[in-house]
């Protein structure tokens, strides 16, 4: 999976896993916010539909990577925390399908990502959380160009 490979590659290039995860969530959350705030109705506006679909796909890929990481025998997180992340990832997948069908908005996905970002930043990364701009001025995490939209 390209998203997992990019996630692992990015982890190897940064100072800490938490910082990388924060930046990645900040970028995907900004993409969700941009898609949500774009003009028009996604049911009739192809440009907005594409923005929403791409943001949802990227968010889903990120959460799939988190899920794969939590399932790994090398993961050092406590079992209870890994279980919570796995549960959230399953919920994100279901919510993504609802949003792609127009049966849900992006607000809950954005809120979950922001909550996880707050948890990641509470470990001493005082400059990381900027509520006005997800991710602040941090270096971007490279997003793979998958060329297809999945849910």
Image (spheres, grey):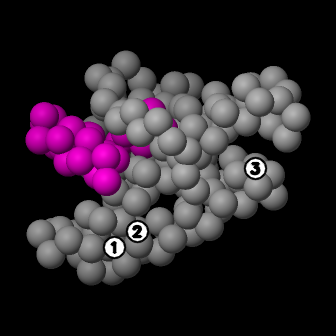
Q: Earlier in the sequence, mark 1 or mark 3?
A: 1
Marks 1 and 3, Cα distance to the nearest angstrom? 27 Å
Q: Residue at x 61, y 52 (%)?
A: 109
Secondary structure, magenta segment, majority class = helix
Can residue 48 be seen in this snapshot? yes
* Badge 2: residue crowd in 10 Å (few <14, some 14–19, many ≥20): some
User: Which residue is the site of mark 1?
Assistant: 81
The answer to whether residue 5 is magenta is yes
The answer to whether residue 12 is magenta is yes
Q: Residue at x 85, y 41 (%)?
A: 43
Q: Are marks 2 and 1 in contact (CB under 8 Å)?
A: yes
User: Which residue is the site of mark 2?
Assistant: 85
Image quarter of residue 91: bottom right
* Badge 1: residue crowd in 10 Å (few <14, some 14–19, many ≥20): few
Identify the image quadrant of the C terminus.
bottom right
Identify the image quadrant of the N terminus.
bottom left
Give the percent coordinates (x, y) of residue 93: 56, 63
Can residue 122 be seen in this snapshot? no
Of helix, strand and loop, which one carries label 1?
helix
């Amino acid at each position: 999976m390209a998203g997992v490979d990019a996630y692992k590659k990015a982890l190897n290039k940064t100072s800490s896993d938490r910082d990388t995860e924060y930046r990645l969530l900040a970028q995907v959350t900004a993409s969700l916010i941009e898609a949500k705030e774009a003009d028009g109705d996604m049911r009739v506006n192809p440009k907005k539909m594409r923005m929403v679909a791409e943001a949802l796909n990227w968010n889903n890929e990120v959460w799939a990577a988190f899920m794969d990481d939590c399932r790994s025998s090398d993961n050092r997180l406590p079992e209870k925390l890994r279980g919570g992340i796995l549960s959230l990832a399953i919920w994100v997948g279901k919510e993504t399908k609802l949003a792609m069908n127009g049966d849900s908005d992006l607000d809950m996905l954005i809120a979950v990502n922001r909550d996880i970002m707050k948890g990641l930043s509470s470990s001493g990364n005082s400059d990381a959380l900027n509520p006005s701009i997800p991710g602040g001025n941090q270096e971007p995490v490279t997003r793979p160009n998958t060329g297809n939209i999945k849910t």
